[in-house]
C-alpha cells in the first residue's frame, strides 16, 4: 500500500503538463553528469542526483563544503571548522555531530579518483575533502548507496568534484580576489587564478590553477597563557596542474597533480553550560572559549593521477591510476575527560599530539558500450592498496608541571588491500522503458598492528602489542527501471546496496579494570536503499525532481565512549525514510529560482549497548540530521548599460532541530546528547559584470543568526557539566573581483 501511494504521488505530479508557457521564459539548462560512469543528461539518470555547475558555484559564492548544503536536498553538514567537517546524506551517521572518529560513509571523488581511506582507522568521516570550488566544472552529489559502481564506503552516497579539463587551441586566464569582514571576528581573504595554455594545436594543452584562502576565526580564547582573539581561522592553499594529450582521434591521456595544505590556529568550539543552557563564558554576541592549549591543526594531501580513454568503436575503454598521500597533525585538549578519569592528579591541561599519514595507490579499468543502443553495458575492475600510520601521545599537566610527560602513547599501523570487479547493463525494452541490473564483488585483506604504552595509574591504555589480520568478501547490487513520458520527463524505481569495510578493530582497555573493551575484528555494515522518483519538465522553464526512499541499515559500525575509552563495535539496525524535492524555475529571461526541501526520519530500530550500559535506545534519532530542511535561492540578471549586466540575488536556508548524539548517551554518563535548535540563514548578493570583468558584493548570514552547527563531547563518569558548541559563521560582508583574459 505504501508503494502504491508513492507511485500515485509521482504519476499524479505529471498533471503539471497543463502549465502555460511564459513568452520570455528560458529553458532549464541541460546538465551532463557522469553519475553512472558514462556521460548523460541528469534528467535521464534514474536516481537522485544534484549538481552545482561551475557558473553556479561562482554566482552563489561557494567557498567551502558547507556552502553547498543549502542547494542539495538530503545533505547536511556537521562540524563548524573548515577541513574538519562531515557530510551526512539521508541521515546516515552515528558518531555524533563532533565526528568521533567515524569511518567514511560518503564516497569522495576528484574526477574518477576515490579520495582518502576506506578503513575504520583513518577517522575519514571527520575530514571530508574540502577543496576550493574555483575553476571546477561541477560538483555532483549522488544520494543513497552507490556500492555497485563506486564500491566501499559509498554507503550513503557519493560527492564528486569534476575538474575542468584543459582546452585545445584556446588560451584563457582568470583571476579572482575576495575580501570579507566577519562581525566580531577576523577578516577573510582569498586569491585564485587559472591559466589554460594550448601547446600543440589539437594535440596538447595544459591548465594550471592556484588558490590561497584565509577563512576567518571568530571565537576568542580566554585561557590564561593562551588568550587569543579570533581562534579557529584556517589558511587553505593549493592548486591543480593538468596536461591533456590527444595523439589520435581515438586516444586521450590526462595527467593531473593536485595539492592542498590547510593550517588552523585552533578549535572554534564555544564552552557551553549544560545546566544554564548558555555560554559558560561571555555571551552569544561574544563567542568565547577557555582552552589551555593552542590546539593547532595541519592537513596536507597530494594526488597524482593518469586517466586514459580509448575509443574502440564498439566500446570505450578507460583506465585510471592514482597515487595519493595525506598527512594530518592536530593537538586537541582532552583535559575535561582526563579530569573525570583521574581526579587525583588535578589535571589542568591534557593536549594530545595526534599524527596520521596515509599512502594510497589505486587503479580502475573499465570498458563501456556506446550509448543509444538496445543494450548498454559497462564492466570493470578496481584495485586499492592503502597504508596508514597513526600516533597519539597524551601529556597531562597540573600547575604547569607534566605528570608524567608520557601519560599514554598509541601507535596504529594498518595495511588495506582491495580487489573488486563490477558490471551493469541497461536493456531498452522500448524507446520509453528500460531496466538496469548491476553487481559488484570485492575481496579485502587487512593487517593491523597496535602498540600501546602507559605510565598513569590506573592505566589509560595497556602496555601491549597486538597483531590482527583479516580477510573478507562483500557483494553489492543495483537494479532500476525507468519510464520516459516523451519530453515531459521520467519516473523511476531503484534498488541499491552499499557497505563500509570491517576488519581488525582498535583495542581499547578499561582504565579501571585493565581489561580489553571491544572485539578483535569488526564486521562490515550494510545498507539497502529502496527509492522511487520522478524528474519532470512540464514546461520548458520549470524542472521538478522528487525522490522518496527507504533505507535499511544493518550491523552499524559504532564509535562510542565507554568510561573514557573509545570503542568500535557492530550493533543494532536503523532505518531512514525520507523525501527530497528540487524545483528549478526560469519563468522570465534572466531570472533563476532554485528551491529544495528535505524530510528525513532516520532512527535506530534496536538498542545499542556496551557492556552493561545502554548507550542508545530503539527509536533514537540518528545524530546530526534535521527532520526538515529547505532553501530558496533566486538570482536576476539584467542589462545596465552597453556591455554591462547587473545581478541581484539572495537565498533563505532553514535547518531543523538535530541531536548531537544518541539520546541514551546522557544516561550512560559518557557523551551527552545536546539538542541543536533549528535556525534560519539569509544570504544576499549583487554585482556588475562584462565579458571580462566582474565585481560581486555579498552578505552571508545577514541576520547574524547564531546557528548551532555541532556539539562536541567533554567529560565522562558523571562529571558532565559543559560541552563544546560550534556555531555557523556570523554575519559576513565582502566583495569579489574577477578578471578574465
Image (cartoon, rainbow, N blue to C red):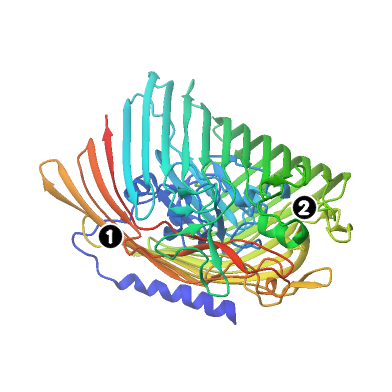
Left/right of residue 259 with respect to residue 390 in the rendered view = left
Name the residue at 53% across, 75% down: 276
Q: Residues within 10 Å of mark 2 (few under 14, many from 20)?
A: many
Residue 106: percent from the left, percent from the top? 60, 53
Distance CA(mark 1)–CA(mark 2): 47 Å
Q: Quadrant of the N terminus?
A: bottom right
In this view, the residue in front, 337 or 496, is 337
Residue at the top extreme, as displayed: 200
> Can residue 404 be seen from the camera position used here?
yes
In this view, the residue in front, 659 or 574, is 659
Name the residue at 57% across, 66% down: 531
Left/right of residue 401 with respect to residue 330 in the rendered view = right
Residue 194: percent from the left, percent from the top? 37, 31
In this view, the residue in front, 339 or 506, is 339
Residue 520: percent from the left, percent from the top? 86, 53
Local secondary structure at mark 2 = loop
Q: Quadrant of the C terminus?
A: top left
Eye-nearest disc, 1 or 2? 2
Q: Is residue 242 above or below residue 53?
A: above
1 or 2: tag closer to the N-terminus: 2
> Can residue 543 be seen from the camera position used here?
no
* Residue receiving disc 2: 502
In this view, the residue in front, 394 or 445, is 394
Q: Residue 621 got which mark?
A: none
Give the total of numbered labels. 2
Local secondary structure at mark 1 = loop
Name the residue at 37% across, 51% down: 30
Q: Residues within 10 Å of mark 1 (few under 14, many from 20)?
A: many
Name the residue at 10% across, 42% down: 642
Residue 361: percent from the left, percent from the top? 68, 33
Residue at the front extreme, as displayed: 399
* Residue receiving disc 1: 586
Amino acid at each position: 500500500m505504501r508503494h502504491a501511494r508513492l507511485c500515485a504521488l509521482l504519476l499524479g505530479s505529471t498533471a503539471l503538463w497543463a502549465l502555460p508557457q511564459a513568452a520570455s521564459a528560458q529553458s532549464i539548462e541541460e546538465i551532463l553528469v557522469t553519475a553512472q560512469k558514462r556521460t548523460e543528461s541528469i534528467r535521464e539518470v534514474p536516481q537522485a542526483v544534484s549538481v552545482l555547475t561551475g557558473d553556479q558555484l561562482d554566482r552563489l559564492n561557494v567557498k567551502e563544503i558547507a556552502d553547498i548544503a543549502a542547494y542539495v536536498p538530503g545533505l547536511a553538514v556537521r562540524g563548524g571548522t573548515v577541513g574538519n567537517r562531515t557530510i551526512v546524506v539521508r541521515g546516515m551517521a552515528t558518531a555524533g555531530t563532533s565526528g568521533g572518529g567515524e569511518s567514511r560513509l560518503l564516497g569522495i571523488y576528484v574526477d574518477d579518483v576515490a579520495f582518502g581511506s576506506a578503513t575504520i582507522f583513518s577517522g575519514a568521516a571527520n575530514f571530508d575533502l574540502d577543496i576550493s570550488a574555483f575553476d571546477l566544472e561541477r560538483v555532483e552529489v549522488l544520494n543513497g548507496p552507490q556500492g555497485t559502481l563506486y564500491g566501499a564506503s559509498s554507503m550513503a552516497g557519493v560527492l564528486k568534484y569534476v575538474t575542468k579539463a584543459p582546452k585545445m587551441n584556446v588560451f584563457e586566464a582568470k583571476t579572482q580576489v575576495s575580501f570579507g569582514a566577519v562581525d566580531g571576528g577576523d577578516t577573510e581573504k582569498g586569491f585564485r587564478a587559472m591559466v589554460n595554455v594550448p601547446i600543440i594545436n589539437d594535440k596538447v594543452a595544459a591548465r594550471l590553477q592556484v588558490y590561497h584562502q584565509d577563512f576567518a576565526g571568530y571565537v576568542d580564547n580566554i585561557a590564561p597563557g593562551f588568550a587569543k582573539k579570533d581562534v579557529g581561522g584556517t589558511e587553505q592553499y593549493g592548486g591543480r596542474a593538468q596536461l591533456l594529450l590527444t595523439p589520435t582521434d581515438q586516444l586521450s591521456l590526462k595527467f593531473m597533480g593536485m595539492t592542498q595544505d590547510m593550517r588552523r590556529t585552533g578549535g572554534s568550539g564555544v564552552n557551553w553550560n549544560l545546566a544554564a543552557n548558555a555560554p559558560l563564558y561571555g555571551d552569544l554576541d561574544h563567542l568565547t572559549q577557555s582552552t589551555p592549549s593552542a590546539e593547532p591543526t595541519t592537513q596536507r594531501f597530494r594526488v597524482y593521477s593518469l586517466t586514459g580513454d580509448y575509443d574502440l568503436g564498439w566500446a570505450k575503454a578507460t583506465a585510471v591510476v592514482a597515487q595519493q598521500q595525506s598527512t594530518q597533525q592536530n593537538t586537541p585538549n582532552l583535559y575535561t575527560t582526563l579530569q573525570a578519569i583521574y581526579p587525583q592528579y588535578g589535571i589542568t591541561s591534557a593536549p594530545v599530539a595526534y599524527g596520521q599519514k596515509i599512502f594510497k595507490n589505486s587503479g580502475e579499468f573499465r570498458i563501456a558500450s556506446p550509448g543509444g543502443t538496445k543494450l548498454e553495458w559497462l564492466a570493470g575492475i578496481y584495485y586499492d592498496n592503502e597504508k596508514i600510520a597513526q600516533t597519539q601521545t597524551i601529556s597531562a599537566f597540573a600547575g604547569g608541571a607534566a605528570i608524567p610527560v608520557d601519560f599514554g602513547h598509541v601507535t596504529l599501523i594498518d595495511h588495506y588491500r582491495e580487489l573488486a570487479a563490477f558490471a551493469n547493463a541497461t536493456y531498452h525494452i522500448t524507446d520509453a522503458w528500460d531496466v538496469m541490473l548491476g553487481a559488484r564483488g570485492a575481496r579485502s585483506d587487512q593487517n593491523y598492528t597496535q602498540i600501546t604504552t602507559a605510565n598513569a595509574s590506573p592505566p589509560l591504555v595497556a602496555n601491549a602489542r597486538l597483531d590482527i589480520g583479516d580477510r573478507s568478501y562483500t557483494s553489492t547490487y543495483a537494479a532500476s527501471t525507468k519510464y520516459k513520458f516523451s519530453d515531459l520527463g521520467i519516473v523511476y524505481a531503484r534498488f541499491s546496496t552499499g557497505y563500509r569495510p570491517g576488519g581488525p578493530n582498535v583495542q581499547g582497555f578499561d582504565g579501571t579494570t585493565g581489561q580489553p573493551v571491544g572485539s578483535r575484528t569488526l564486521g562490515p555494515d550494510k545498507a539497502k536503499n529502496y527509492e522511487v522518483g520522478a524528474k519532470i519538465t512540464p514546461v520548458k522553464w520549470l524542472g521538478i525532481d522528487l525522490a522518496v526512499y527507504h533505507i535499511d541499515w544493518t550491523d552499524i559500525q559504532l564509535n562510542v565512549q565507554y568510561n573514557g575509552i573509545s570503542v568500535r563495535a557492530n550493533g543494532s539496525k536503523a532505518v531512514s525514510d525520507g523525501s527530497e524535492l528540487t524545483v528549478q524555475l526560469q519563468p522570465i529571461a534572466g531570472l533563476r529560482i532554485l528551491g529544495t526541501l528535505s524530510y528525513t526520519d532516520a532512527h535506530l530500530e534496536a538498542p545499542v549497548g556496551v557492556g552493561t550500559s545502554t548507550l542508545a535506545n530503539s527509536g533514537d534519532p540518528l545524530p546530526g540530521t534535521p527532520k526538515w530542511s529547505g532553501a530558496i535561492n533566486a538570482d536576476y540578471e539584467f542589462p545596465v548599460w552597453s556591455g554591462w549586466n547587473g545581478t541581484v540575488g539572495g537565498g533563505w536556508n532553514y535547518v531543523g532541530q538535530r541531536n548531537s548524539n544518541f539520546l541514551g548517551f546522557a544516561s550512560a554518563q559518557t557523551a551527552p546528547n545536546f539538542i541543536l535548535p533549528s535556525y534560519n540563514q539569509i544570504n544576499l548578493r549583487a554585482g556588475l559584470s562584462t565579458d571580462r570583468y566582474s565585481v560581486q558584493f555579498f552578505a552571508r548570514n545577514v541576520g547574524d543568526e547564531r546557528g548551532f552547527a555541532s556539539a562536541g563531547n567533554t567529560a565522562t563518569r558523571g562529571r558532565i557539566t559543559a560541552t563544546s558548541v560550534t556555531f555557523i559563521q556570523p554575519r559576513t560582508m565582502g566583495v569579489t573581483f574577477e578578471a578574465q583574459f
